[in-house]
Image (cartoon, coloured by chain):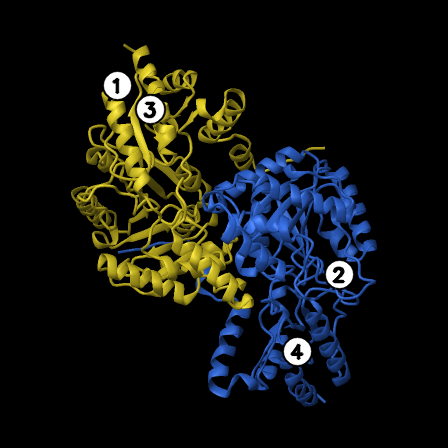
Chain colours: A yellow, B blue
Amino acid sequence: MNTSVNKKMYGLGSKRSEIRELFEYGKKRIAEVGAENVFDFSIGNPSVAAPDCVKEALASLVLEGDPVALHGYTSAQGDAAVRKACADYITATHGTACGADDFYMTCGAAASLTISLNALSCEDNEVIVFAPYFPEYKVFINQTGMKCVEVKCSEEDFQIDFAAFEAALNENTKAVIINSPNNPSGAVFSQATIEKLACILNAAEQKYGHSIFIIADEPYRELVYDAETVVPFIPNFYDNTIVCYSFSKSLSLPGERIGYVFVSPKAAAHDEVYFAVCGAGRALGFVCAPALFQKIVPMCIGKTADLSVYKKNRDILCSALTQYGYKVVKPDGAFYLFVKALEEDSHAFCEKAKAHDLLIVASDSFGFPGYARISYCVSTEMIERSLPAFEALAKEYK
Amino acid sequence: MNTSVNKKMYGLGSKRSEIRELFEYGKKRIAEVGAENVFDFSIGNPSVAAPDCVKEALASLVLEGDPVALHGYTSAQGDAAVRKACADYITATHGTACGADDFYMTCGAAASLTISLNALSCEDNEVIVFAPYFPEYKVFINQTGMKCVEVKCSEEDFQIDFAAFEAALNENTKAVIINSPNNPSGAVFSQATIEKLACILNAAEQKYGHSIFIIADEPYRELVYDAETVVPFIPNFYDNTIVCYSFSKSLSLPGERIGYVFVSPKAAAHDEVYFAVCGAGRALGFVCAPALFQKIVPMCIGKTADLSVYKKNRDILCSALTQYGYKVVKPDGAFYLFVKALEEDSHAFCEKAKAHDLLIVASDSFGFPGYARISYCVSTEMIERSLPAFEALAKEYK
């Protein structure tokens, strides 16, 4: 008896991602040699607690809220008061005039992306991503039938290589995904980069006679560590922008799946895009974003978990690794350090690291070979313990 | 400047469902004539509170749990302990041997369905649905590129019309969705129906040489009201079964989006199907089911909200409507009453009902013209208040 399943889905489900594979190896190694001897930098799972306001909001809602209203369906695009709170916050923070009806609440950033991509997808469309990029972008884009076109960032500063970008643009380009602060490089696109990107896209829209969207994937927006680092708010620079946001990292709630799609009110054909977003959410089976966690948004928006440990971790790692002779990309945000592999083959480099029980991810799956990603959303104590292993690894190459 | 969005998604998002349209009309009418004069039976939103165990579980997790672990990512298929609790419960309740790795936790029944359908979908595949059916089935099936084939139930007892079913089966049939207790008819498929369905499907699998799946959509499993009503557990009757479950109705948590996909361990190529389910969850952007509500599952599974009000509502409505001369389908479960329209055109009938401020849904969108759906997950007091309006409506037709 022949059983056929969808081959693409089987492929995605049967092969663990490299990151997940390494994480599972780490758990096995811990059982063998003890947690104190394994340095697991594989996964981007926030290591700090949600801020107190989350606990307080949850407790008051659960203990005092009307349980029928509390856990009931919200409208498909999200509770109106929750969407208004998001709009008010964006207006107050970025000076961007917007309202509740520009927001569609989602089950986190991944859902925001799949919904936005399905909403925009038309025949023969292409979506440009800047490498290094979060590997799931390719999965999400391909699921819609669109083509994923990779453009490498400049290795010097991990800003956009505009010559390569202009070469990739064509009449089929529908959207460009940007992710700043970036996973895996930690780079933040400067205002100059965003202005130039907007200028080129405006010209391309004129040339090809159709809208091209920026999809700004912003789960790490609040994770920047230096006073001088500004993360430009894209809708203030480019009209056809869809922001995909998640509270996963800012409020340390990655498992709760709460975020939004924000369709800039200045977008061409705003209503068509917004309705297509609503339709995609419906067709993909989202119904509504989790009700209880929607309701904590107005109570906690603008607050963040205590992110100071990430800055501390970043500073310890950067300074030690540079001292040992590694070349690292200056990480302005997120909780990833992108380090140049000490040999051409990043997989071989990461295998050698593994022999020191240093679990770091080869950069090939991010579309940018020759590096490794270190997730520093871990305990500072583990980082300090890991330094001799990084030093020993560097010495092997001397 | 031309802005193209996905036409299908735009269509789904810009046109409210008839049910949602009626619900919005009801809110407008309440503002005009007062809540006491509007009888809104449009929407299937549970009207009873979640059971105390949910509040207790949430409170103890929020107040005493480790906030990092509590809100962190679970594995994509769901927390292992949660999946084990589901397996243990199914084994204990239905005598079905199964384990944690047969379960994939989801954001509710809609997500369970879109994930299962995307997992199975191959070129030219068809999925059979039995009318009357939940209208979103068609949306979910079409989103995968498969064809939705409707087979009407017998009007006599709302069981499967097997002659029509056999005529619809062909070499492209990949799956059959069943929904028992049914939305909108309230009918429960009997054991005899399930046995005959299984027998015909086994023969069809032999004839066409490939697996055909039953997708059992079971959000209303626990909502049955008479001791003699048994809802057969499909995996005990047919091997190639995927159960799509949700805790929305049993625990009155529809907004929280928590449910599962259960791939029967007896399914042919179980692992291929399960991996394809994992892949589809990934491609559609689900990441993991909401973490906090996953954790309440082991603490509350098998308990239900106080469903006695639904039985009371059903009995009052059935008896009064029958007395007024309506013909109703005997509702064994769920919280819907399917009543025959008093004229051929069910839309015209529902419009006349609307003139009495009785908001009931014409059955055409359920693929079964000539009826109306009454959602009785409302207050008993509103039902009692609505009876004179039902009586007056019936009198118009005499």
Q: Earlier in the sequence, mark 3 or mark 1?
A: 1
Q: Quick one: SS at disc 3? A: loop
In the rendered image, residue B382, in percent from the top left (x then y), is placed at 62, 81
User: Residue B188 vs residue B183: left or right?
Assistant: right
Q: Quadrant of the C terminus of chain B?
A: bottom right
Q: Quick one: SS at disc 1? A: loop
Residue at image mark 3: A369
Q: Give the answer, above or below, for where B299 lies relative to A363.
A: below
Q: The numbered mark 3 sits on a residue in which chain? A: A
Q: Amino acid at mark 3?
A: Pro
Residue at image mark 4: B380
Q: Quadrant of the N terminus of chain B?
A: bottom left
Quarter residue B387 falls in: bottom right
Q: Give the answer, above or below, for where B314 lies relative to B61.
A: below
User: Residue B229 vs residue A203: left or right?
Assistant: right
Q: The numbered mark 2 sits on a residue in which chain? A: B
Mark in the foreground, 3 or 1: 1
Q: CA distance from mark 2 to mark 1?
A: 70 Å
Residue at image mark 2: B188
Q: Amino acid at mark 4?
A: Thr
